Image (cartoon, grey):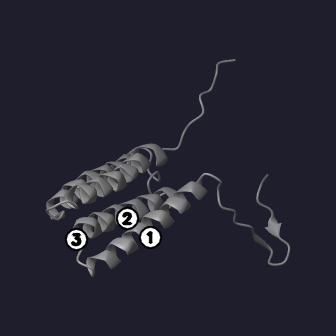
Amino acid sequence: MADRDDPTTNRPRHRVDRTAVPHLLAMVIFGLLAWSGAGMLRQGVDGLAVPSLMIGAAGAAGALLTVTGGASRHPGRRPHRLVRGAMVLVAVAAVLTGAALAPSGMDRGFVISVDAVLAGALASYALLGSERRRTARLPG
């Protein structure tokens, strides 16, 4: 169904594409993670704060580029691969940073495992969520 003009304003209605909704949700979730990481910086839990801030910012930016079309605006140059690759690199860097900043003692393993799970979520989103799926066409 095509967008129809709004009779009250005589302007076309703008609808959100159904494929954009999961990316908008991811943008909110990763944004909240970045906000949480920024808040944890003041509490002295750098092993969780810095990776959360890194992962949240990278995920929110990647989701924003996916929603706005910035990641696929130039299909010949494939910038969406650059965005996805950058998100994966940030995920790896966040795990390494979290391991370097993790406290010694019995909390060390917990902090590193939380950072690894969050980094895995970012990498999964980068590899699975950013690519638009194309439907295979059958001959005939």
Q: Are marks 2 and 1 in contact (CB under 8 Å)?
A: yes
Q: Residue at x 38, y 53 (%)?
A: 122
Q: Upstream in the sequence, badge 3 or badge 1?
A: 1
Task: Describe residue 127's horizontal placement relative to residue 54 as left or right.
Answer: right
User: What kind of residue is marked 1?
Assistant: Leu
Q: Nearer the viewer, mark 3 or mark 1?
A: 3
Give amino acid for label 2: Gly
Q: Earlier in the sequence, mark 3 or mark 2?
A: 3
Q: Which quarter shows the C terminus?
A: top right
Residue type for callout 3: Asp
State how far apart marks 3 and 2 are (Cα).
15 Å
Left or right of residue 18: residue 24: left
Residue pictured at 25% horizontal, 51% vertical: 92
Up-down relation of residue 123 to residue 106 (above or below): above
Q: Which mark is residue 46?
A: 3
Q: Position of residue 98 (x, y in %)?
A: 22, 60
Numbered tag placed on residue 32 in the rendering:
1
Q: Secondary structure at mark 3?
A: helix
Nearer to the camera, 20 or 99:
99
| Cβ atoms under marks 3 and 2 closer than 8 Å | no
Q: Secondary structure at mark 2?
A: helix
- Say which element carries label 1: helix
On residue 56, which mark appears? 2
Q: Is residue 23 left or right of residue 123?
A: right
Q: CA distance from mark 2 to mark 1?
A: 7 Å
For this orientation, the residue located farthest to the bottom is: 42
Q: Is residue 97 left or right of residue 61?
A: left
